[in-house]
Image: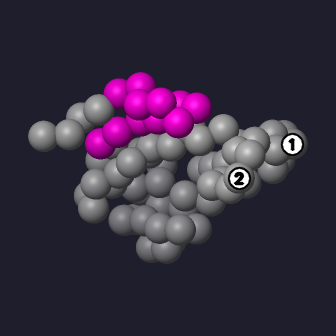
Amino acid sequence: MVDLVRRMVSEVNVPLHEAVAMATQNPAQAIDLQTKGRLRVGADADLVVLSPKLEILRVFTGGDELASNRQ
C-alpha cells in the first residue's frame, strides 16, 4: 500500500494527507471498520511510520511495535 501512496504523491501530485486517507480512512469507512483508518481515541493504534522519502521505518499494531527499519 505504501507504494501506491508514494506513487500518488510523486506521480499524480496528490497531497500526502489525501493519499494517506485514500489508503487508510476511505477503505476502512467503505467496509465499516470503525476502529481502523484514523488516529483517534478508541481506534486500534495500527500505525506505519514513514521517512520523508515515504519509506517504511516502523510498524505498530495495537500500539505495539511489530517491525523496525530504523538505522
Q: Residue furthest top?
A: 66
Dot 2 corresponds to which residue?
41
Kindly state the secondary structure of the residue where label 1 is placed: loop
What residue lies at 24% left-to-right and 35% top-to-bottom? 69
Numbered marks: total? 2
Q: Which residues, given as a range, are shown in magenta?
A: 57-67
Residue at left offset 40%, top offset 55%: 6
Reply above or below: 3 against 26: above
Question: What residue occupies the far front of the structure in this picture?
Answer: 41
| Mark 2 in CB contact with mark 1 (< 8 angstroms) | no
In the rendered image, the vertical position of residue 71 relative to residue 22, given as above or below: above
Magenta run includes residue 64? yes
* Picture residue at 47% right of the left edge, 54% below the top: 5
Q: Is residue 46 magenta?
A: no
Query: Which mark is drawn over residue 32?
Result: 1
Task: Where is residue 61? Give x, y as percent.
Answer: 53, 31
- Amino acid beneath label 2: Val
| Colour scheme employed for the rendering of this structure | one colour
- Residue 25 in the figure: left or right of residue 10: right
Residue 38 coordinates in the image, percent (x, y): 66, 54
The answer to whether residue 40 is above or below residue 10 is above
